[in-house]
Amino acid sequence: MKWKLLLLGWVTITGSLFLGSLSGTVAEQFGLSRNSQLLIQGLVMSGLVVPIILYLYRHADRITGVKPKIAVYSWKRAYHFFTGILLATTLAVLGFIIATTQGWIVIEQWHNPDYWFTPLLFNIIIAFLYEALPEELAIRGLLYDVLRSRFATWLAVLFQTLLFLSVPLVVNQLQVLVGLNPGNIITVDYIILILCYGICLQLVRLWTRSLWTSIGFHLAYLEITRFVVLQSDGPSIITFYETVNGLGGLYISFGMLVLGGIIVSLFILGAKRFIWKRA
């Protein structure tokens, strides 16, 4: 029965991601704006994932025999949403300080909020609905908890990470199958990023015992990379150039945010374990 729950949870997040991307394509055919397409994708994604996963959680608690006093997704733990945001922001700021002092990046301009604030606010809403909330609730939430009821913590973290990676891989194949453009370009770099990112997000949840921490970290990571690190044609909070092409951005987005998040989380988990043993 546990494997059935695991499969249903995985199918829910994978199928919803595919349907979310499909809904955006359908909206485009009706001539809706890009922002409207993104909003529809987010509403479809969360509208499917959230109620289904919460329903499956009710069965998971009964089947696994583990029902915490306060659920990891409970509003009573929602203040940890800001813990996740604060952690990601702190790591990013430290990353920029180190990168600038080492001469890897040179900041040229801080842009006026009038230029980036509205696009940032809209993207926060979309990223929360389409990525952070449904992915964390399903993968770092239900799938991990079902795995943890059967395996040791480190194995449960590893297996949820592999399931996390399988979602975009399968969705890409489904998109190609029905004639849609793939949502992601699957490369070795992308696979390494997803694997490390999945571990980071799970560890962040573990030391706070709140799914809201990983939701906050996930959301902050997306916005930092999109509006600060990636120097694309869209609105950006700052403009900088890299003395060694790709080094500064990679150091901040992957080295500090992802690997740094893993290191900080392992340190906190180790310290908590040490204190618990000494008590």
Image: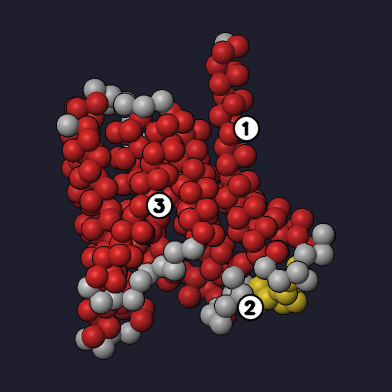
- Which of the labelled discs sits on residue 165, or is there none? 3
Q: Nearer the viewer, mark 3 or mark 2?
A: 3
Q: Position of residue 10 (x, y in %)?
A: 27, 48
Measured in 3D between alpha carbons, the distance from the residue under mark 3 to the one under mark 2, in whole angstroms, is 37 Å
Quarter of the picture containing the N terminus is: top left
Residue that appears at 64% across and 52% down: 255
Measured in 3D between alpha carbons, the distance from the residue under mark 1 to the one under mark 2, in whole angstroms, is 37 Å
CA neighbours of label 2 inside 10 A, class few (<14), some (14 to 19), many (20+): few
Residue that appears at 36% across and 81% down: 34
CA neighbours of label 3 inside 10 A, class few (<14), some (14 to 19), many (20+): some
Q: Nearer the viewer, mark 1 or mark 2?
A: 1
Q: Secondary structure at mark 2?
A: loop
The amino acid pointed to by label 3 is: Leu
Residue identifier under label 2: 112
Q: Nearer the viewer, residue 28 or 169?
A: 169
* 276 with respect to 140 (left or right): right
Quarter of the picture containing the C terminus is: top right
Q: Secondary structure at mark 3?
A: helix
Residue identifier under label 1: 267
Q: Secondary structure at mark 1?
A: helix
Q: Position of residue 60 (x, y in %)?
A: 22, 33
